């Protein structure tokens, strides 16, 4: 067997160790500023001699939908993960989409393992681990719970000793550094055929491109990528979404609290606002992002509500369920009656009383909308024909590293 087919796409089996890296929250300007400042010498060489472009991630521009798109090579309409969080209408409950039961498509990682490849996955937060490792034989663990790995569940034990770093705090740059350090040690000791590394956006939520903290973080990434390069790896680097400031002139969060608005229009508590950015780690963003879905009561006129919402300052667009599913390649049965996207500098909330913003110790930076859709797509190999004019996606990363690298 020289190739496999997954979700309608063909992939060659790797002829060299192949690594795909998802740098969470990597607005392209982070790399541009770090390279310009001399903080990423390896990346500077790759941009000159390898292949790079600005690609589009999937909307909503959140972690779970995009990581799953990258490892399935397909949009959410295929794999089913349309947010970090949703309203399960069948069971009348709001839930995290961390359980593999929500997946509707197999991953490329599982298919590669079934084809005989040694596969390793390291992710920063444990919320992604079960989704990424679903159906996959191989190594799969998170930085967050690296001290709890077992051969039976994670395909490896003794991770902390292997990496030589203590388990980092979940709200730290070190959580992502552990991912890279683990990736290098795995490549040195286990030499997987395929490896997927996925970080956290703690730094990007707190620090803008070009700041000392951001540059130091990207310098760290550059050092580890250079080590993987020296080990002979083909490396594709992309992101799950970008990141932007979401504040007014006084540096306070610029928020539209949709539930409070809808209470006045359709009756108090009768509309359900779902914020798919919501996950177990909301300290650094307060569950505020630039994308929301709305479930309306049966007697509400969705056409009227849509028009009124579209006229609110800070709203970029409002879509019906069918419009959003078609425009953003989303599963319609997992959306609300309306989908709302805010402009670049504005975030969407439910009710003001439901958001705890006490953990925001710097001006809010967040994501979720179309304004965070531009992400890097980089390969440390030269692609002879990049198909000029094609719309590249972050979920083309495995195509680049396996078929074109």
Image: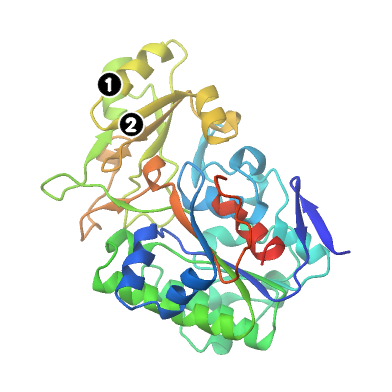
Say which quarter of the image contains residue 51: bottom right
The image quadrant that residue 109 belongs to is bottom right
Instruction: Judge left or right: residue 212 versus residue 230.
Output: left
Circle on res. 311: 1
User: Looking at the image, which residue is at 30% across and 37% down?
Assistant: 343
Q: From the viewer's perspective, is 7 left or right of 313? A: right
Tell me where residue 184 appears, x and y as whole percent. Answer: 57, 82
Residue 375 visible from this viewpoint: yes
Q: Which residue is drawn at 36% across and 12% down?
A: 304
Query: Who comes first in sequence, dot 1 or dot 2?
Result: 1
Quadrant location, the C terminus: bottom right
Q: What is the number of the mark on residue 316?
A: 2
Q: Which of 200 and 15 is in front in this view?
A: 15
Q: In this view, does 176 lie above or below 59?
A: below
Quick one: SS at disc 1? Answer: loop
Give the quadrant of residue 300.
top left
Q: How many labels does the image show?
A: 2
């Amino acid at each position: 067997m020289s190739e496999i087919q997954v979700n309608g796409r063909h992939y060659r089996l790797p002829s060299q160790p192949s690594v795909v890296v998802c740098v969470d929250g990597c607005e392209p300007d982070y790399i541009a500023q770090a390279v310009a400042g001399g903080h990423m010498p390896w990346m500077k060489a790759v941009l000159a001699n390898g292949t790079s472009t600005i690609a589009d991630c999937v909307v909503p521009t959140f972690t779970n939908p995009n990581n799953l798109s990258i490892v399935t090579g397909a949009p959410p309409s295929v794999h089913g993960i349309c947010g970090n969080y949703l309203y399960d209408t069948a069971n009348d409950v709001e839930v995290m989409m961390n359980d593999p039961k929500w997946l509707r498509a197999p991953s490329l990682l599982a298919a590669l393992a079934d084809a005989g490849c040694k596969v390793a996955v390291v992710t920063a937060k444990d919320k992604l681990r079960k989704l990424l490792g679903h159906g996959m034989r191989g190594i799969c663990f998170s930085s967050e719970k690296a001290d709890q790995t077992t051969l039976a569940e994670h395909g490896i034990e003794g991770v902390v000793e292997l990496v030589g770093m203590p388990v980092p705090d979940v709200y730290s740059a070190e959580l992502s550094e552990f991912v890279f350090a683990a990736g290098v040690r795995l490549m040195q000791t286990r030499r997987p055929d395929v490896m997927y590394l996925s970080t956290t956006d703690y730094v990007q939520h707190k620090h803008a491109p070009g700041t000392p903290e951001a540059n130091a973080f990207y310098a760290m990434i550059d050092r580890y990528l250079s080590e993987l390069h020296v080990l002979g790896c083909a490396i594709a680097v992309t992101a799950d979404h970008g990141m932007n400031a979401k504040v007014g002139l006084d540096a306070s969060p610029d928020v539209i609290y949709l539930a409070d608005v809808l209470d006045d229009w359709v009756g108090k508590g009768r509309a359900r606002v779902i914020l798919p950015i919501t996950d177990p780690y909301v300290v650094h963003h307060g569950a505020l992002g630039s994308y929301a879905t709305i479930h309306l009561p049966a007697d509400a006129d969705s056409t009227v509500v849509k028009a009124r919402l579209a006229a609110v300052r800070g709203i970029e667009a409002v879509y019906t369920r069918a419009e959003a599913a078609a425009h953003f390649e989303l599963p319609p049965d997992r959306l609300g009656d309306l989908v709302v996207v805010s402009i670049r500098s504005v975030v969407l909330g439910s009710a003001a009383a439901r958001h705890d913003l006490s953990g925001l110790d710097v001006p809010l930076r967040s994501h979720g909308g179309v304004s965070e859709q531009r992400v890097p797509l980089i390969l440390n190999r030269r692609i002879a024909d990049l198909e000029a004019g094609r719309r590249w996606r972050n979920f083309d990363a495995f195509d680049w590293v396996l078929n074109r690298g």
